[in-house]
Amino acid sequence: MKSTAGMNIREWMDSRVVPAEKMRYMTGGRDFIDDAEIAEKLERNRSNDPGRIKGILDKSLSIETLSPDDTAVLLNVTDDGLLEEMRETAAKVKRKVYDNRIVTFAPLYMGNYCVNNCSYCGFGTRNARMERKILSPAEIRGEVGTLAGAIGHKRLIVVYGEHPLTGAEYIHDSVKEIYSVKVPARKGYGQIRRCNVNAAPMPVDELKLLKEAGIGTYQVFQETYHHDTYSRVHPRGTIKADYAWRLYAAHRAMEAGLDDVGLGALFGLYDWKFEVMGLLYHSRELENTFGVGPHTISFPRIEEADASPITRKVPYAVSDDDFMRLVTVLRLSVPHTGMILTARENAGIRRKIIPLGCTQTDASTRIGVGGYGAKEEGQDMSDQQFTLGDTRSLDEVVRELADMGYITSFCTAGYRCGRTGGCIMELLKSGQEGRFCKLNAVLTFREWLDDFASEGTRAAGEKIIRKELDEIASRMPETVPILTEYYKRVENGERDIYF
């Protein structure tokens, strides 16, 4: 790894992009997103033919990644009856691959320094009002103490700006610090078991350092796949202005051995149908190149940000109805991939979107640096990247999910057992991963109910636990003896037991 000691910020920025590490994946100097081709497919596939659409839905139910033409057909459906059939199929796909589990997490913002000046982001260099800071080791322990010890989170998405103060070395050390915190709870203990990372694109040698730290999913959003729009919202002279460097971030991560990667687009910068197609093309490119698609896809909508006029007049605002459509089509197009719904959305729309195939959502969310240790609740725009739509506690969200018939899974076992990358993709496509996850969901939910749940949430959770145990006895009777043993050990205070 190159030393950055003694560099000024401009020198550091100029050293970030390694041309060979993007060019080696390109064909004739061109990337895999062809704007004209995507526009042509969206224009040509305007069929509402029920027979063709049923055939496409059958492909999705067989857990097969759809083709761009098939996806374009679904994006153009306007018939109410066909849209309802698509929503029903999306829910079936989710149940087939992931059962009725929902994974919860919290974002932890490690710093708000950034060298970029993206037009939609409150962290941009133009925002002179923002007080810049990064978390020290002691502050990290304090934040994690709240997240793991008071709230009960087991997973985090740890968020870093693009800046030399929060580069690969800081990410490595801060993730190690997070994993080291262990906090007594009512019956057992609280601890973060999986740190997914949302960070800037990096060279391969730095990504290897992140792997050594034990990170989970490495998440880089392209923001918009439309080349001209990308250029407009990412000013020249910044690292992020390099479209291809960002586009091939997941390729470099897989090359470095980080086989769980997360993709995403920021909906509202350009036409939502184009962005869905871009995410599909990206997913297929990873499958074709590495044999493994993305572990997760995220689909945030633009929310208001300080010093960012574009967020107050969104260029391609996505209505709630269209948001439901795009989530449905994403679920159908990449049926094996996890889908993340965030607290950018309000509680009402989250209730509508989750049944369409979401697998992960955040709760007790704060996005100011040091926000979990803040004495006062609320949103200070001068300290945040954007505004939140849902600030409910994890306890409230878990109770609502239980009332909706979902079990909240706090399981991280697959990552410790090697069920990542190609292995987990095969298990997901075959439906086998659900066997492990259902058992581990019960054990980890039992943990959380005993250690952190309020009385009302515990009552709602007990109903789900009984239902899950009955299903396991019916569908997987051979697992009951060992599950019964593990379950009793958890009830007696043992923690982190898994299949």
Image (cartoon, grey):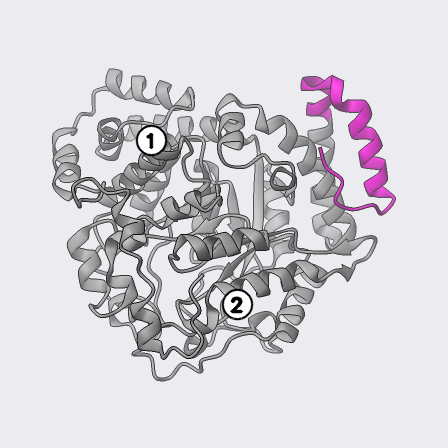
Which residue range is magenta in the image? 470-499
Q: Quadrant of residue 344?
A: bottom left
Visible in this render: residue 388? yes
Q: Nearest the camera: 48 or 56?
A: 56
Q: x, y percentage for residue 79?
A: 24, 29
Residue 475: say if magenta.
Answer: yes
- State left or right for residue 6 relative to residue 439: left
Task: Assign a secondary structure to mark 1.
Answer: helix
Amino acid type indicated by mark 1: Asn
Q: Main secondary structure of the magenta part?
A: helix
Label 2 is placed on what type of residue? Tyr
Residue 73 % position (x, y): 22, 29
Numbered disc 2: secondary structure: helix
Q: Position of residue 420 (x, y in %)?
A: 54, 37
What is the C-alpha distance between the residues marked 2 and 1? 33 Å
Q: Residues within 10 Å of mark 2 (few under 14, many from 20)?
A: some
| Quadrant into which the C terminus falls | top right
Task: Give 208 or 452, whichever is nearer the viewer.
Answer: 208
Residue ID at (36%, 37%): 286
Residue nearest the observer in this picture, 127 or 86: 127
Determine whether 262 is above or below 75 in the image. below
Residue 144 vertical position relative to residue 261 in the rendered view, above or below: below
Q: Which residue is mark 2?
A: 170
Of residue 418 and residue 265, the one placed in the foreground of this image is: 418
Question: Who comes first in sequence, dot 2 or dot 1?
Answer: 2
Number of other residues with Cα within 10 Å of mark 1, as a class: few under 14, some 14 to 19, many 20 or more: few
Magenta stretch contains residue 476: yes
Dot label at residue 288:
1
227 sits to left or right of 456: left
Residue 237, x across and y down, in percent = 22, 70
